[in-house]
Image: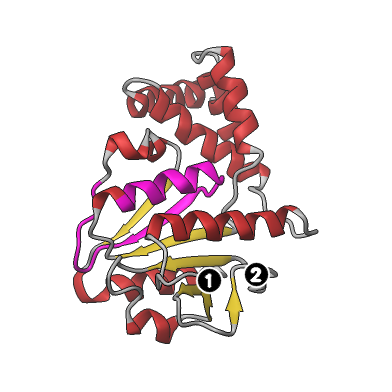
């Protein structure tokens, strides 16, 4: 059904856009995901969203137990249309809900903190899926994240400043770990089925009234298969 639905969508989309969707989907991954914990500076949070898209990260998890996440369109540059964003905003349980969901789906929770000395972004084990977790600009990750994390890692620095801006930290971490995955034998890219599902979402976002178009196409396909 999904293959037929995508084919129907593709008949309505310019060839150049179809080719772009196909090309980008082959480099997309859910093997690495990003968690933002109560990021309150909107421009930084939006920059992280854009960074996820640039490095092919398909999913972003946003914990909003204290601060509400808002996308700044001029900074995100449309990345919100191409990255799947999951929000956790149920008050005191938001963080635990997020972490539990990720662990249940096989992720190791990785807390980014300048104080970590066991691993860096260059030697963190990558044999299992990773959820890179970033905290607020001033306070960093919470003690609760530290207690729930499987790893605490740092980004090597040689200057006086204690830490990078959160969006820079995300970019450096994703670049380093993705580079290692690309040079490994790990099967880290989206499965074919995930690629189809992802391209369907992109088609919906690309087309005006995409949700309505999808429902109409699904109805037609069901009637055709009867």
> Left of 173 or right of it: where is 183?
right
- Image quadrant for the N terminus? top right
Instruction: Tell me the residue at 52%/74% (across/down).
Output: 154
Which image quadrant for residue 194? top right
Mark carried by residue 110: none
Instruction: Tell me the residue at 41%/29% (across/down).
Output: 204
**Are there few (<14), some (14-19), or many (20+) residues within 10 Å of tag 2?**
few
Q: Position of residue 58 (x, y in %)?
A: 51, 48
Q: Position of residue 175 (x, y in %)?
A: 59, 54
In the rendered image, is residue 1 in sight? no
The residue under label 2 is 128
Can residue 46 be found in the magenta stretch?
A: yes
In the rendered image, is residue 126 in sight? yes
Mark carried by residue 158: 1
> 223 above or below 94?
above
> 91 above or below 211?
below
Q: Secondary structure at mark 1?
A: loop
Can residue 77 be found in the magenta stretch?
A: no
Q: Secondary structure at mark 2?
A: loop
Q: Position of residue 81 (x, y in %)?
A: 39, 35
> 19 above or below 78?
above
Most distant residue in the front direction: 160
> Left of 190 or right of it: where is 148?
left
Stretch of the chain drawn in magenta: 44-70
Q: Position of residue 145 (x, y in %)?
A: 38, 79
Instruction: Tell me the residue at 33%/39% (across/down).
Output: 75
């Amino acid at each position: 059904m999904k293959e037929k639905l995508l084919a129907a969508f593709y008949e309505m989309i310019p060839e150049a856009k179809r080719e772009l969707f196909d090309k980008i989907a082959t480099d997309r991954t859910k093997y690495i995901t990003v968690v933002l914990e109560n990021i309150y500076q909107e421009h930084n949070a939006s920059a992280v969203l854009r960074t996820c898209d640039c490095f092919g990260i398909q999913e972003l998890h946003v914990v909003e137990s204290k601060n509400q996440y808002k996308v700044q369109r001029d900074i995100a540059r449309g990345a919100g249309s191409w990255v799947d964003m999951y929000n956790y905003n149920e008050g005191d349980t938001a963080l635990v809900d997020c972490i539990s969901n990720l662990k249940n789906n096989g992720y190791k929770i990785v807390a980014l903190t300048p104080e970590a000395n066991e691993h860096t972004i260059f030697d963190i084990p990558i044999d299992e899926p990773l959820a890179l977790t970033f905290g607020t600009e001033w306070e960093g990750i919470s003690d609760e994240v530290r207690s729930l994390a499987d790893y605490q890692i740092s980004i090597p620095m040689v200057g006086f400043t204690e830490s990078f801006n959160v969006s820079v930290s995300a970019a450096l971490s994703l670049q380093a770990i993705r580079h290692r995955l690309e040079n490994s034998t790990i099967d880290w890219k989206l499965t074919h089925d995930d690629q189809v599902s992802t391209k369907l979402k992109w088609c919906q976002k690309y087309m005006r009234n995409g949700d309505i178009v999808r429902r109409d196409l699904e109805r037609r396909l069901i009637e055709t298969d009867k």
